[in-house]
Image: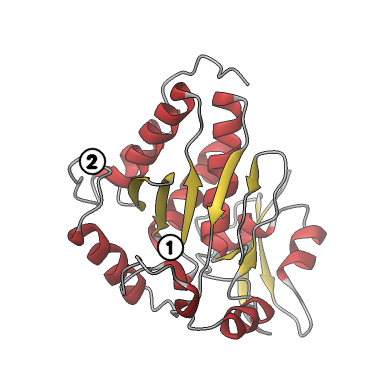
C-alpha cells in the first residue's frame, strides 16, 4: 500500500508540557549500554515484576497485571507468542497505531510483547525489560515514508522521557520500552486537551467520583458511565486494572 503524504506529528504541542520535566537525550535510536540501563532502572523504579516463566505470565494475566493486545483496525500482531503487556503499554500501542494508520494507511505491526525470562532469545541481555510487559517490538514497514514517520514520532516521545527506543536491523524493528507513570500522565493530559476532561478536585460536571463496590470491574464501571477503561486508568494514574472495594475513582464522562 502506498504511504500517504504525512504532516509533522501532532504530538509536539502536548509534548512541550513534558519537555521541561525531563532532560532531553541525544536524538539517536542506536542501542547502547546506557539505554539498556535506563530501561532496566526505570522498570525497577516502577517496581515492575520480571516474569520468569510462562506460568508466571498466565498468572499475571489472570490477576489483571498484564492485559491482552487485541489486534484491530489500527494494529496487528505477527508471531507474538505472548500477546500481553502492561495496561499502559497497551494504551501506547493503541494510540500510536491509530496515528500510524492515519499517517500511513497501514496497520502498525507488533512482533513481540511480554517474554518470560526463560523464553528470551540467546542474544538478549540479562537486563532486558521484555519480561515485565512494559516493552514491545514494532516492525519497520517496507515504505520509507512510514518508517520515517514512525522514527520521528518515537524520537519525540523518547525526547520527552516517555519511552526508550532502540532501532534494530536484523530483523528490522523498533524496540520500545514504555515508561509507565510518565506515559500515563501524558495520556491524561491528552485526554484533558482532546475531550475537555478536567480532573481538578473542583467538582467539574464532566467528572464523577465513584466508590468501588464489591464485585465491580473497571470494564463494567466504564460501560455504565459511557467511558473507557483506558480513560479511567489514565485519570486515576492506575498501573493495572485491579481495583478494591471502597477505592475512590475519578470517572471522566464519555460525553
Residue reaching furthest to the top: 5
x and y, in percent, of residue 93 in the image: 55, 49
x and y, in percent, of residue 23 in the image: 19, 50
Tell me if mark 2 has few (under 14), some (14-19) or many (20+) residues whose alpha carbon lies within 10 angstroms of its own: few
- Is residue 49 placed above or below 161 in the rendered structure? below
Q: Quadrant of the N terminus?
A: top right
Residue designated by label 2: 28
- Visual colour scheme: secondary structure
Residue drawn 70% across the image and 49% down it: 71
Report, in whole angstroms, how far the alpha carbon at label 1 lies from the one at label 2. Answer: 21 Å
Residue drawn 77% across the image and 77% down it: 216
Q: Relative to 170, is 249 on the left or the right?
A: right
Q: Which of 199 and 216 is in front in this view?
A: 216
Tell me if mark 1 has few (under 14), some (14-19) or many (20+) residues whose alpha carbon lies within 10 angstroms of its own: many
Count numbered badges in the picture. Answer: 2
Q: Relative to 142, is 166 on the left or the right?
A: left
Whether residue 196 appears in this view of the structure is no
Which SS class for mark 1?
A: helix
Whether residue 163 appears in this view of the structure is yes
- Is residue 48 placed above or below 133 in the rendered structure? below
Q: Earlier in the sequence, mark 1 or mark 2?
A: 2
x and y, in percent, of residue 31 in the image: 25, 52
- Is residue 223 placed above or below 25 in the rendered structure? below
Q: Relative to 101, is 115 on the left or the right?
A: left
Residue designated by label 1: 180
Q: In which quarter of the image is the C terminus?
A: top right
Residue 255: image tag: none
Q: In which quarter of the image is residue 13?
A: top left
Residue drawn 56% across the image and 49% down it: 110
x and y, in percent, of residue 87 in the image: 57, 63
Amino acid at each position: 500500500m502506498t504511504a500517504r503524504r504525512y504532516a509533522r506529528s501532532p504530538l509536539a504541542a502536548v509534548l512541550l508540557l513534558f519537555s521541561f520535566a525531563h532532560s532531553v537525550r541525544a536524538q539517536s535510536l542506536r542501542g547502547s549500554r546506557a539505554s539498556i540501563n535506563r530501561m532496566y532502572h526505570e522498570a525497577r523504579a516502577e517496581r515492575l515484576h520480571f516474569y520468569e516463566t510462562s506460568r508466571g505470565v498466565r498468572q499475571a494475566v489472570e490477576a489483571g497485571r498484564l492485559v491482552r493486545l487485541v489486534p484491530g483496525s489500527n494494529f496487528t500482531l505477527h508471531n507474538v507468542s505472548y500477546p500481553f503487556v502492561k495496561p499502559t503499554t497497551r494504551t501506547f500501542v493503541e494510540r500510536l497505531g491509530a496515528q500510524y494508520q492515519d499517517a500511513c494507511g497501514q496497520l502498525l505491526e507488533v512482533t513481540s510483547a511480554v517474554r518470560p525470562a526463560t523464553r528470551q532469545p540467546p542474544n538478549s541481555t540479562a537486563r532486558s525489560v521484555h519480561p515485565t510487559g512494559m516493552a514491545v517490538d514494532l516492525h519497520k514497514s517496507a515504505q520509507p515514508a512510514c518508517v520515517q514517520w514512525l522514527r520521528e514520532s518515537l524520537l519525540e516521545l523518547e525526547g520527552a522521557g516517555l519511552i526508550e527506543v532502540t532501532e534494530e536491523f536484523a530483523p528490522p524493528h523498533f524496540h520500545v520500552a514504555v515508561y509507565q507513570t510518565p506515559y500515563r500522565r501524558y495520556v491524561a493530559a491528552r485526554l484533558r486537551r482532546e475531550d475537555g476532561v478536567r480532573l481538578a478536585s473542583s467538582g467539574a460536571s464532566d467528572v464523577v467520583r465513584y466508590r468501588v463496590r464489591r464485585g465491580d470491574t473497571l470494564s463494567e464501571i466504564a460501560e455504565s458511565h459511557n467511558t473507557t477503561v483506558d480513560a479511567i486508568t489514565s485519570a486515576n494514574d492506575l498501573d493495572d486494572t485491579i481495583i478494591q472495594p471502597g477505592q475512590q475513582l475519578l470517572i471522566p464522562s464519555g460525553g
